[in-house]
Amino acid sequence: MKKRRLFAAAAAAVLAMATAATALCAEDADVPTAAEVLAQMNVGWNLGNTFDAWGAPDVMSNETYWGNPKTTKEMIDAVREQGFNTLRIPVTWAQSLGEAPDYTIDGEWLDRVAEVVDYAYGEGMFVILDTHHEPDFWLVPQPENVDELKTELTAIWTQLSERFADYDYHLLFEGMNEPRTKGSEKEWSGGTDEERAVVNELNKAFVDTVRASGGNNATRSLIICPYGNSVTYNSVLQLEVPDDPYVMVSAHLYTPYYFTYEPEGQSINEWDGTLKKDIISNVDLLKRHFLSKDIPVIVTEFGAVHKIYKGADGNETENTEQVLKWLADYMEVMNRFGIKCIWWDNGNYSDEGEKFAIFDRRNCSWYSQEIADALIEDCQKISDQPLQ
């Protein structure tokens, strides 16, 4: 009971400090707002299936446990040299945490994550750090769990905020990734009213914790998300966004699903533009509820898998040309509203499973130079900001 009372008192102090910090944010004209940070981004690349991997016998083995090689500065430099100025580093922290209530992050694991952050940050890239596969472990947004969830989430972000407090606006924090109840009926369709309310509480706890932590965190751009990062009417409508110029909203848009993925027996392999309306309808929802209210939006995951399919002539063909057509339509819609996007690259180009890779990490080259070039070219049509 004593620990609970101490935590409650600490939480109250955090809230008070966060309110003061938010007020200071609006007065700090030297730091770019979330919208201004997005204006400096062109396109991003996800270091997927790496620090977000889990299940290895020891936490330090997770980085390569899902088949990707150890991350090197040479890899990140190659991504930067291609023209990407934003790197998202998904991280699953659950396996690295100590016991409650402190949930101390393993020091060696945190040091290694920080090392890779520095690969990109040191070269002037924007870096997004998140909490990733936590729903596989503890982040189950149910009302009966909310106090425990806030305790663990704030413990993680207290430590990360302290570690990176002196980094400038090029480092962004993304509070959660796809918070959802796995296996539930509405896991990927926006959740329930109760689940969405819990996600709102967790987003608020994340923002308040970072804002109260000192250093540059008072004005750091923070990314919050709706339930599951889903773009559905209810998930978007019910997302509570703080009145904070340094907050943006994240969505995941693998749209349309039957083209961007390869569902058995239902895959759409060729792009003729007729389903561009699906992309437009999703962005229209984001526009009505966020963009029209000057709330910036970032798509922290999108992409289309590499497929080999039989064309009209009966011969097997790769879908690169089709992906290029889709990408042109996709980015035309996103560019129209200033929404920046980060390609999901899980390192898999030809093995079983979801083949989202465009970058060959072992050889520091591009599986599809055409797609890599198109990502830069299509984004540069709107955003032509140099690396800073």
Image: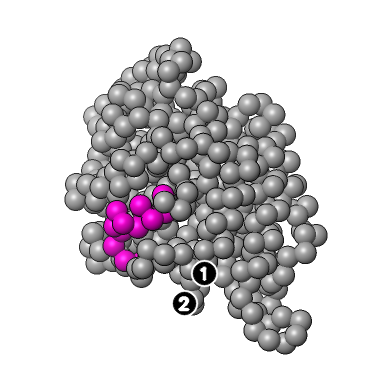
In which image quadrant can residue 56 be found?
bottom left
Q: Does residue 248 appear in the picture of this structure?
A: no
Q: Amino acid at mark 1?
A: Lys
Judging depth in this view, the residue of 272 and 164 nearest the camera is 272
In which image quadrant can residue 294 be found?
top right
Tell me whether circle 1 and circle 2 mark residues in contact (CB < 8 Å).
Answer: yes
Q: Position of residue 351 (x, y in %)?
A: 47, 77
Using residue 160 as the reference point, say whether residue 376 is left or right of it. right
Q: Position of residue 258 (x, y in %)?
A: 68, 66
Pointer 1 local density, CA inside 10 Å: few below 14, some 14–19, many at least 20: many
Using residue 286 as the reference point, say whether residue 42 is left or right of it. left
Residue where numbered disc 2 is placed: 351
Pointer 2 local density, CA inside 10 Å: few below 14, some 14–19, many at least 20: few
Q: Position of residue 99 (x, y in %)?
A: 24, 47
Magenta-colored stretch includes residue 283: no
Judging depth in this view, the residue of 239 and 36 nearest the camera is 36
Pick the quarter of the image with the N terminus: top left
Pick the quarter of the image with the C terminus: top left
**Residue name at image x 72 percent, y 70 percent:** 270
Q: Amino acid at mark 2?
A: Asp
The mark tally for this picture is 2
Q: Does residue 37 appear in the picture of this structure?
A: yes
**Residue name at image x 36 percent, y 18 percent:** 17
Q: Is residue 275 above or below residue 225?
A: below
Q: Secondary structure at mark 2?
A: loop
Residue where numbered disc 1 is placed: 355
Residues in magenta, as a range: 68-80
